[in-house]
């Protein structure tokens, strides 16, 4: 697919095939001597030069520089798009396999935009399969690569910047998911420090919302409240539905954490209204689930409304159709409502059904096992609770979410100790110590 010829030789060949002279190819931007030097390999063509000359010769810059045929690039782009769709549809094994094959294509390093699409998609697929640490490694490397690249044209710089922001957002999210909130904050703040002077965009507001969630989970309430106000102001200044939705979505959660019921209600209604404007049952379901989960945690007195919102979210997610992990998260929230309402049997049935789902990985699987442990403990089934808690710890350890894994193993050890299972208690404590020191 990639020839051995030099770019200069290809330039000369394509010019002759087009029946053009040096003067005609040079146009007003170059001298004839420049074209001669490029063809002789005495001067290297910059991306800007490649773009101008390729347009005049009726080919792509990649073909001019590397000899990659347009039809071959079209095939690679189509494959990358199919891998992206498989990831969006929740066909994770297919997505990982296709991204893996694409990463081995010899032409990929020659096309920065396609390379970014594949590497970014591969990292998101790793995240979705529960391999957060591998995703973090890939995203960290990709962010370093993209941040070090130089571009010459304004439209490329805009796209390049959005890529940097998207990678930083995913990296911040992955660090949160493995419980490394310090790293999540460092990544988010470093990205904002770099990107904010260049101006706020929709995507940068979304990155800010992800950072805001890390502040919230870390208990940095003063910083959370201050940054939340800034994001809301910026989103209103931008004026786009996308930015305002991202700010209101997380702003509602902040208000709930701070006990500001009036503002929580206002921002929740605003987020739901903005989501209706954007459309899409998947996003609508995720938003309703997010708001209901935070209400259950911080404003649990209105159980009827919470249950109604979760039922609507579940219907949206099923109809979308959503990733199985999203559906399972919603069903977990419904199980928690069942538990609070005293419907322990129904809550346990929901949790067991989720645990039996073989395709579920990562945080959702952890939450399902921990909820099952809590239900069993409440019902007096301490051996069952210990087994469920140990399984949650195993999943966290496999995710290399080591601080959370250590805490989960200690909880499992305590439960084993309560039933007199000394060997299992000792094993859990050893695992807790190992995770704490890894």
Image: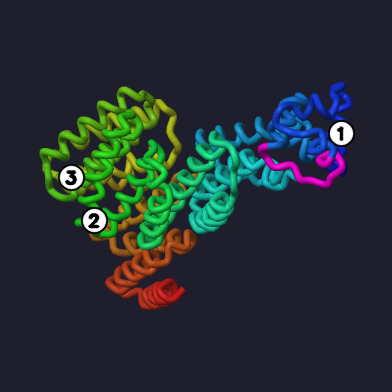
Query: Residue 85, percent across and down?
Result: 55, 32
Q: What element carries label 2?
A: helix
Q: Kindly report which numbered mark, 2 or 1, lies closer to the viewer in this rendering.
A: 1
Mark 2 sits on what residue? 223
Q: Does any portion of residue 146 appear in the rendered image? A: yes
Q: Earlier in the sequence, mark 2 or mark 1?
A: 1
Q: In the figure, 265 relative to 375: above or below?
A: above
- Asked whether the viewer can see residue 314, the reply is no
Give, as a single range, the part of the protein colored magenta. Answer: 37-48
Q: How far is disc 3 from disc 1 in space, using C-alphas?
A: 65 Å
Q: Where is residue 283 in the image (x, y as percent from the top left)?
A: 37, 32
Q: Which badge, 3 or 1, is on the more N-terminal residue?
A: 1
Tell me whether circle 3 and circle 1 mark residues in contact (CB < 8 Å).
no
**What residue sits right under mark 1 in the picture?**
12
Q: Could you give the CA–CA distance between mark 2 and mark 1, rounded to whole angstroms?
A: 60 Å
| Marks 3, 1: nearer the viewer | 1
């Amino acid at each position: 697919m990639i020839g051995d010829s030099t770019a200069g030789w290809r330039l000369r060949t394509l010019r002759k095939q087009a029946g053009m002279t040096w003067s005609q190819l040079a146009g007003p931007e170059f001298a004839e001597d420049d074209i001669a030097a490029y063809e002789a390999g005495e001067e290297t063509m910059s991306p800007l030069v490649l773009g101008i000359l390729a347009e005049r010769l009726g080919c792509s810059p990649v073909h001019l520089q590397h000899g990659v045929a347009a039809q071959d690039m079209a095939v690679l782009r189509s494959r990358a798009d199919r891998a992206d769709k498989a990831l969006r549809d929740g066909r994770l094994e297919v997505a990982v396999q296709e991204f893996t094959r694409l990463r081995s294509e010899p032409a990929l390093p020659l096309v920065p935009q396609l390379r970014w699409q594949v590497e970014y998609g591969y990292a998101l697929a790793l995240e979705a399969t529960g391999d957060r640490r591998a995703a973090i490694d890939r995203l960290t490397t990709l962010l370093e690569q993209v941040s070090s690249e130089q571009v010459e044209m304004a439209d490329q710089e805009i796209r390049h910047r959005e890529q940097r922001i998207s990678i930083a957002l995913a990296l911040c999210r992955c660090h949160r998911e493995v419980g490394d909130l310090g790293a999540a904050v460092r990544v988010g703040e470093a990205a904002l420090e770099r990107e904010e002077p260049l101006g706020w965009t929709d995507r940068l507001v979304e990155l800010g919302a992800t950072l805001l969630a890390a502040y919230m989970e870390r208990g940095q309430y003063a910083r959370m409240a201050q940054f939340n106000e800034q994001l809301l102001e910026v989103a209103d200044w931008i004026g786009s539905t996308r930015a305002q939705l991202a700010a209101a979505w997380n702003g509602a959660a902040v208000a709930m954490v701070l006990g500001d019921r009036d503002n929580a209600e206002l921002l929740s209604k605003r987020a739901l209204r903005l989501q209706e404007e954007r459309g899409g049952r998947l996003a609508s379901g995720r938003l309703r689930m997010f708001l209901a989960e935070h209400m259950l945690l911080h404003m649990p007195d209105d159980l009827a409304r919470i249950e109604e919102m979760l039922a609507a979210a579940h219907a949206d997610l099923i109809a979308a159709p959503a990733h199985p992990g999203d559906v399972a998260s919603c069903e977990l929230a419904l199980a928690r409502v069942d538990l609070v309402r005293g419907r322990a049997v129904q809550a346990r049935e929901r949790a067991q059904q989720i645990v039996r789902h073989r395709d579920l990985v990562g945080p959702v699987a952890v939450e399902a096992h921990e909820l099952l442990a809590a239900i069993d403990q409440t019902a007096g089934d301490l051996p069952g609770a210990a087994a469920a808690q140990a399984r949650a710890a195993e999943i966290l350890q496999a995710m290399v979410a080591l601080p959370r894994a250590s805490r989960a193993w200690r909880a499992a050890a305590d439960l084993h100790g309560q039933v007199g299972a000394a060997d299992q208690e000792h094993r859990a404590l050893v695992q807790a110590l190992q995770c704490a020191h890894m």
